[in-house]
Image (cartoon, grey):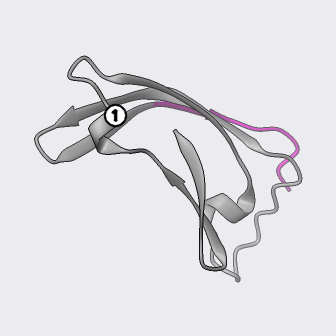
Amino acid sequence: MALSQQGNSAALVVSIARIPDEGLAFQAEVTATHLQLPPATEVELPRPVQVQGWLTKVAEQVYFQGMTRGTDCI
């Protein structure tokens, strides 16, 4: 898993080719910028959110099963 800058916004990028048939464990620390929340959103994330789970590739689709964890959301 890699974080990638695309223009002015950041995105979480996973190379589909690197996901083996048995799946891939995924863990990242995500900021509000990575989530690309709409400007009118009233949610503030003063600290990064932890994302943890499992990526599974089925044909040309990727599925994520996992959880997110954060604190001090306003």
Quarter of the view holding residue 10: bottom right
Say if 27 sits above or below 46 in the image.
above
Question: Is residue 69 within the magenta segment?
Answer: yes
Q: Which residue is drawn at 66% across and 79% down?
A: 8
In percent of width and height, residue 59 lies at: 10, 41
In percent of width and height, residue 3 lies at: 60, 50
Q: Which residue is drawn at 70% across and 74% down?
A: 41
16 left or right of 60?
right
Residue 53 or residue 42, whichever sits in front:
53
Question: Is residue 18 within the magenta segment?
Answer: no
Amino acid type, mark 1: Arg
Q: Name the residue under label 1.
A: 18
Q: Residue at x 76, y 38 (%)?
A: 70
37 left or right of 55?
right
Q: Which residue lies furthest to the top in this view?
A: 22
Question: What stretch of residues is rendered in magenta?
Answer: 66-74
In the rendered image, which quarter contains the C terminus? bottom right
Quarter of the view holding residue 43: bottom right
Disc 1, SS: helix
